Image (spheres, grey):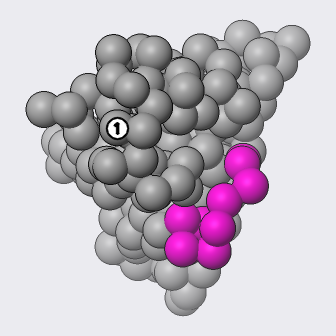
Amino acid sequence: MQRAALLDAARSLLSEGGTEALTFPALAERTGLARSSVYEYFRSRAAVVEELCEVDFPLWAAEVEAVMAVADSPEGKVEAYVRQQLALVGDRRHRAVVAISASELDAGAREKIRAAHGGLATMIVEALDALGHTQPRLAAMLLQGVVDAAVRRIELGAAEDPESITEAAVAMVLRGVRG
């Protein structure tokens, strides 16, 4: 239960203040634990980040996959893939992963984040193959790049509203996947 409380506190800190806010003293304060007790659960900030990715990313990916499953065409799956990811930008789990993706982490934590994103992109490979792409894995990674750029734009609080960014990303991706 303490570990779950620490992860929840970490999500809140990341959502509220980005990676700078994720400190062991702040985790201790949020959970009512002594700072030394936090070290009993996690050896470093990177360890907190790694566990957040292991716990939260599969849940988030399952939400994207569920929306894709109800789409009735390959293009519908592509659109659902993009829209759901951008809809989740405000979700605390997603905000935490976005915040930590930009931080200075050790190689192990960065690799876990890259692997999680790679796993997400593989969800769309079948739809891209059905659309006739000769290199559907490459197309999936490029498509994810558009999604990632839109996520960053939304996170930055760009001049455009999130709905406009989503519509632009969907239009760009659908035009691109049609070839």
Task: Tell me: 119 left or right of 105.
Answer: left
Residue 149 is one of the magenta-drawn residues:
no
- Indicate the quadrant containing the N terminus: top left, top right, bottom left or bottom right: top left
Residue 107 is one of the magenta-drawn residues:
yes
Residue that protrudes farthest toward the right in the picture: 159
The residue type indicated by label 1 comes to Ser
**Which residue in the protein does label 1 denote?**
37
Task: Report crowding for label 1: few under 14, some 14 to 19, many 20 or more residues within 10 A (C-alpha).
Answer: few
Nearer to me, 145 or 125: 145
Tell me, yes or no, if residue 145 can be seen here.
yes
Residue 17: x %, y % from top left: 66, 19
Residue 116: x %, y % from top left: 43, 64
Residue 174: x %, y % from top left: 58, 49
Q: Which residues are magenta?
A: 102-111
Residue found at x 39% / y 26%:
34
Q: Is residue 134 above or below residue 149?
A: below
Residue found at x 72% / y 48%:
103
Please tell me how many numbered marks the rendered image carries. Answer: 1
- Indicate the quadrant containing the C terminus: top left, top right, bottom left or bottom right: bottom right
Tell me, yes or no, if residue 117 can be seen here.
no
Task: Tell me: 144 left or right of 157.
Answer: left
Residue 94: x %, y % from top left: 46, 34
Secondary structure beneath dot 1 equals: helix
Residue found at x 46% / y 31%:
35
Name the quadrant containing residue 109. bottom right
Q: Is residue 85 above or below residue 165?
A: below
Nearer to me, 170 or 88: 88
Name the quadrant containing residue 100. top right
Name the quadrant containing residue 153. top right
Nearer to me, 116 or 32: 32
Q: Is residue 98 above or below residue 95?
A: below
Residue that protrudes farthest toward the left in the picture: 1
